[in-house]
Image (cartoon, rainbow, N blue to C red):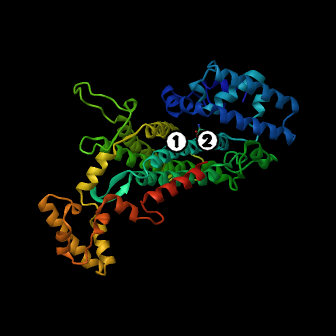
Amino acid sequence: MSTNQLDKKSQAWSALFSEPMSDLVKRYTSSVFFDKRLWQADIQGSLAHAEMLHAQGLISADDWASIQKGMAQITAEIESGQFEWKLDLEDVHLNIEARLTQLVGDAGKRLHTGRSRNDQVATDVRLWLRGEVDEIGLLLTALQTALVDVAEQNADTILPGFTHLQVAQPVAFGHHLLAYVEMFARDAERFLDLRKRVNRLPLGSAALAGTSYPLDRERVARTLGFEAVSQNSLDAVSDRDFAIEFTAAASLVMVHVSRLSEELILWMSQSFGFIDLADRFCTGSSIMPQKKNPDVPELARGKTGRVVGHLMGLITLMKGQPLAYNKDNQEDKEPLFDTVDTLKDTLRIFSEMAAGITVKPEAMERAAKKGYATATDLADYLVKKGLPFRDAHEVVAHAVKDAIAAGVDLSELSLAQLQAYNPAVEQDVFEVLSLRGSLNARNLLGGTAPEQVRKQVARHRVRLG
Ligand code: ARG
């Protein structure tokens, strides 16, 4: 390319082309208005590459100094909003390289020695994503901590536990919240695991086949903090598995958030009345003056569809692509960026919202009482008196049927009435039939007894630091 050929992309691509790209094609193929977001990673990657070129004797000390100086100026220009991003220059990589050449001349033109935009973009995305994975890890810790706090305050709070959304057995509200902590803990584990596969260096793969220059790839990897160097150039420039894996992990977080959202929405409805969300997370209605709507969890439930959609987009993007790099891969960025933005905002807002939940224990307990939540406890009681479980199950079904007809709870039947179902029943049955007795009885690892909830809270606190 002649002097500042890159700058003249408004003309033909290179000497090979007899006409410039049409405006429509320029708009269609350019990515600069979304991938400029990668500028820091791009400059970081270029500096590591240039430093290595110099160390290997492939560019002079003067060129290396000029590149550093130029990149410092470009950094300042971008940070102050003065950098002029040009659609004509297609993407973040060409924009920065062209400006560098404008600023420092030939040294800028030597930067691309032994490199292609194919290994460059793969490096940039990985560098950028690695930073985001680390931030998401911190946000997941914050959300778990907020939930553990509420769980600790509610180790003794009785909530009707549901199966099929029918009252099943009483559980501690704290135990219920810790179920979500388990989900988010697995999410954090997943991000930590996939980080290893994000953190590998493609640079040195060049366009697809590697390069004839004696590059020191390990050196670049060390400079950029990559823990390994890719081992096959064709794979390295075309692989987007790491982006798919990331989006899959993000989708699972959103699915967990969405399940929690659904519960918050139900619990806040008048029919449940179990909790209240702080006003700052709700909105009113323009027509119904009495309304307070849980918009934040509703929106989070909705945004889950968006992130799962990005996963579908990315995984479909790779299907049927021959080796090695294809322009299809430029389409990885918008879904990836939006996934990161949506996930981070959602995690931030949920940490705050969790801390602001008002719990209404009386309503929870009333609902648990209504649903014969201790029927299993009565059956277990009879088993302990010697009845086979299946017989006990049947006996209690009769008792529940009669109690429903009489409009009373099992604990409101008299001892004589209960003994009519089985003579082995004694006075101590009333402790068993109480919600608290039921809760306390499930005192084994993983169970809902308040003592277990407190043990789990302590375990999580150690884990979360
Ligand atoms: N903007 C491109 C992308 O995001 C950079 C790589 C372009 N490589 C190429 N050979 N056209 O994938």
Above/below status of 128 relative to 190: above
Badge 1 local density, few (<14 within 10 Å), some, or many (20+)?
A: many
- Mark 2 Cα-neighbour bin, 10 Å: few <14, some 14–19, many ≥20: many
Is residue 99 or residue 130 the one in the foreground?
Answer: 130
Residue indicated by mark 2: 125
Q: CA distance from mark 1 to mark 2?
A: 9 Å
Q: Are marks 1 and 2 in contact (CB under 8 Å)?
A: yes
- Residue at image position (50%, 29%) is 27
- The residue shown at (58%, 45%) is 137
Res 206 seen here? yes
Along the polypeptide, which appears first: circle 1 or circle 2? 2
Residue 67 position within the rendered picture, expressed as x and y whole percent measured from the top left: 78, 29
Q: Is residue 223 left or right of residue 141?
A: right
> Any mark on residue 336, and which?
1
Ligand 1: give its quadrant. Answer: top right
Circle 2 — which element? helix
> Viewer-proximal residue, 373 or 301?
373
As shown in the figure, which amino acid type bears the numbered disc 1?
Leu
Amino acid type at image mark 2:
Val
Describe residue 311's horizontal placement relative to residue 374 as left or right.
Answer: right
Of 37 and 93, which appears nearest the observer? 37
Q: In the figure, 10 relative to 242: above or below?
A: above
Residue at 69% across / 51% down in the picture? 209
- The residue sitting at 84% across, 36% down in the picture is 59
